């Protein structure tokens, strides 16, 4: 292409020189030397132009070649970097899959233990027939209790256990900083059963710890899901005192939490005040083992503010939940003083500051009215919980489906446990 362009330019200059020479000759201006000089000047001009044009094209070509070489070098570097990134990504995916498999294996082992414990207790209760000496009224009561127990058994084995979360908010901003978890069972018609319906039977048969333990498993799954969504919130989860003292369950539970220490800032174990006060040496020692892993504790159902804060500090209790009405009743009076028999010198506004000196944060629960919040803020309480800030809401079914083990697994585990119990 460049050769053709150069040829056209050459012949163009030649034609121009001949035209000018002919013009001069016809005009009588060109005797031989004048015409020759003109033609020579034009020829020289054309040669100079062609030389400069050729040199410019060569320089441009060299620049293009240099740019192509640089682009090729950058492409090679990018391909090498991409290859390294893909290798690292493949390794990370493989390691992540192995870690996820190991985590699920540990959780399934824990759940199997829980189901076996529930099955053994329920099976023993259902297999015992009423004695012939009981009255008809007592026999009917036993039948009703057994029917309710069978409903609980089916709800657990069919995995009809819902998780409800209620927000715990900061004050006065009312930003959600924690959730408290609750369990609700559903019967065969999918009707939600409130705890008051089955709690008495479950307590009598020793099933409350098993239900609480199943809640712990569910909370661990939800906390992990919230962490994947980069939601930095914790979940309060009830734990039964019998679970803390169970020689069979607790070591497995401790192993599970040891393998999942990443949950220690997001999962907070909660006990009632009466339960906490009733703990023995074994339960206290096991609580210390959980604290060594970085897990924290909370006390709810507080009945009195005359607490042993030094004992709470030694036990790694970081939160106490006190009903808003109780806080107002025991701390506020017309003179602004405190009504704590063990701390007569403590002013109402100093109570929250006192608990913080022991590393304990007060949460006002059962907040129902804005008037209560005004009084609570007077007491310098930094967090609140109650229907005023949000009722407990069920986690969406699709979320639970991702955190639940298959129902077939639960059924098969129950059958296996029953067979082992019956036939040894």
Image (tube, grey):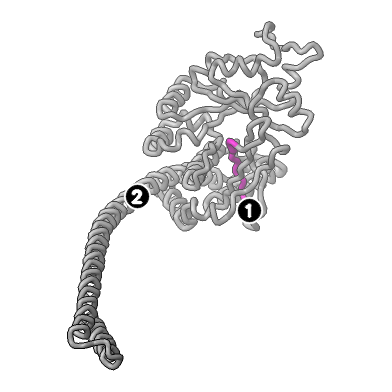
Q: Nearer the viewer, residue 166 or 354?
A: 354
Q: Nearer the viewer, residue 146 or 65?
A: 65
Residue located beneath label 1 in the image: 187
Q: Nearer the viewer, residue 143 or 199?
A: 199
Taking the image as shown, residue 321 lies to the left or right of residue 279, namely right
Residue located beneath label 2 in the image: 96
Position of 271 relative to 334 (above/below): below
| Residue located at (23% from left, 76% from top) | 45
Does residue 346 appear anywhere in the picture?
Answer: yes
Percent x, y for residue 154? 56, 52
Percent x, y for residue 409? 44, 55
**Quarter-of-image position of residue 248:** top left
Position of 346 relative to 395 (above/below): above
**Quarter-of-image position of residue 355:** top right
State the quadrant of the N terminus: bottom left
Disc 1 crowd rating (10 Å Cα; few below 14, some 14-19, many 20+) is: some
What kind of element bears circle 2?
A: helix
């Amino acid at each position: 292409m460049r050769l053709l362009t150069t040829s056209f330019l050459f012949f163009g200059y030649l034609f121009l020189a001949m035209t000018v020479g002919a013009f001069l000759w016809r005009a009588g201006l060109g005797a031989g030397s004048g015409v020759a000089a003109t033609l020579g000047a034009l020829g020289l001009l054309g040669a100079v132009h062609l030389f400069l044009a050729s040199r410019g094209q060569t320089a441009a070509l060299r620049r293009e070649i240099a740019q192509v070489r640089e682009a090729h070098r950058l492409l090679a570097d990018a391909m090498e970097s991409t290859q390294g990134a893909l290798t690292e990504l493949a390794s990370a995916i493989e390691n992540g899959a192995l870690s996820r498999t190991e985590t699920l294996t540990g959780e399934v082992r824990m759940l199997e233990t829980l189901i076996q414990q529930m099955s053994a207790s329920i099976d023993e209760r259902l297999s015992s027939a009423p004695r012939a000496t009981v009255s008809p009224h007592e026999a009917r009561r036993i039948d009703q209790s057994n029917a309710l127990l069978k409903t609980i058994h089916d709800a657990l084995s069919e995995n009809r256990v819902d998780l409800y979360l209620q927000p715990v908010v900061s004050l006065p901003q009312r930003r959600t900083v924690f959730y408290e978890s609750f369990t609700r069972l559903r019967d065969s018609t999918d009707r939600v059963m409130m705890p008051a319906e089955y709690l008495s039977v479950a307590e009598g048969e020793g099933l409350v710890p098993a239900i609480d333990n199943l809640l712990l498993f569910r909370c661990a799954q939800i906390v992990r899901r919230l962490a994947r969504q980069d939601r930095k919130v914790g979940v309060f989860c009830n734990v039964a005192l019998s679970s803390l003292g169970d020689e069979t369950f607790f070591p497995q539970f401790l192993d599970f939490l040891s393998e999942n220490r990443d949950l220690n800032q997001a999962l907070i174990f909660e006990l009632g005040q009466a339960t906490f006060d009733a703990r023995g040496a074994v339960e206290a020692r096991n609580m210390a083992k959980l604290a060594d892993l970085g897990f924290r504790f909370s006390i709810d159902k507080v009945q009195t503010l005359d607490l042993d804060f030094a004992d709470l500090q030694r036990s790694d209790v970081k939160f106490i939940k006190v009903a808003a009405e109780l806080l107002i009743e025991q701390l506020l009076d017309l003179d602004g003083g405190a009504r704590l028999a063990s701390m007569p010198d403590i002013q109402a506004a100093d109570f929250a500051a006192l608990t913080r000196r022991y590393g304990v944060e007060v949460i006002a629960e059962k907040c129902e009215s804005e008037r209560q919040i005004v009084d609570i803020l007077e007491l310098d309480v930094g967090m609140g919980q109650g229907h005023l800030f949000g009722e407990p809401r069920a986690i969406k079914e699709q979320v639970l489906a991702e955190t639940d083990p298959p129902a077939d697994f639960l059924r098969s585990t129950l059958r296996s446990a029953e067979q082992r119990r019956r036939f040894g």
